[in-house]
Amino acid sequence: MKIFKDSKLKNEIIDDFDLGIVDVGKFKTYEYYIVNEGIYDLVDLIVSSISGEIEIIHAPIQIKAHTSAKIIFKWTPSVTIKKGLKANLLFKANEIVTP
């Protein structure tokens, strides 16, 4: 599974999500794209964050092999920071293996 910043799947996220700076009391919504580059469908997909400031707005529960799907999440910071936030999301899924 790979994650991209754009729907054309050109800008891959290699490490952390760089969320930039958002002032306290405001929020920012982000769209990314998950690609299932495997030969099997992914099912029971769960996307989560360890941060209480990041809310998953939309995430697929299944991604067919060799396709992509959009994920949307929102960051509402509790404090204003001087440097941009680097965040991680957790992804879990099962592969459907057909004989």
Image (cartoon, rainbow, N blue to C red):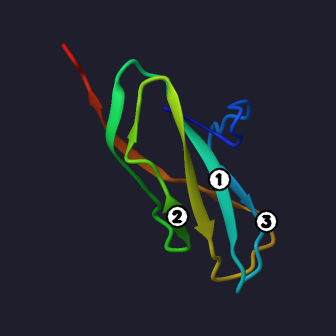
> What residue is disc 3 on?
83
Q: Label 1 to label 2, Cα distance in Å?
A: 10 Å
- Percent from the top left, x then y, of residue 8? 71, 32
Q: Which quadrant would the C terminus be assigned to in this image? A: top left
Residue at 71%, 40% in the rendered image: 6
Tell me: 68 left or right of 8. Answer: left
> What residue is disc 1 on?
31
Residue at 76%, 73% in the rendered image: 22
> Which of pointers 1 and 3 indicates the residue nearer the eye?
1
Mark 1 closeness class: few <14, some 14–19, many ≥20 residues within 10 Å: some
* Above or below, comparing residue 91 to residue 78 in the picture: above
* Above or below, comparing residue 10 to residue 26 in the picture: above
- The residue lying furthest to the bottom in this view is 25
Tell me: 47 left or right of 9. Answer: left
| Amino acid at pointer 2 | Ile
Tell me: 45 left or right of 3. Answer: left
Q: Of label 1 and label 2, which has the lower sequence position?
A: 1
Is residue 24 or residue 46 the one in the foreground? Answer: 46
- The residue lying furthest to the top in this view is 99
Q: Label 3 to label 2, Cα distance in Å?
A: 24 Å
- Percent from the top left, x then y, of residue 45? 36, 45
> What residue is disc 2 on?
57
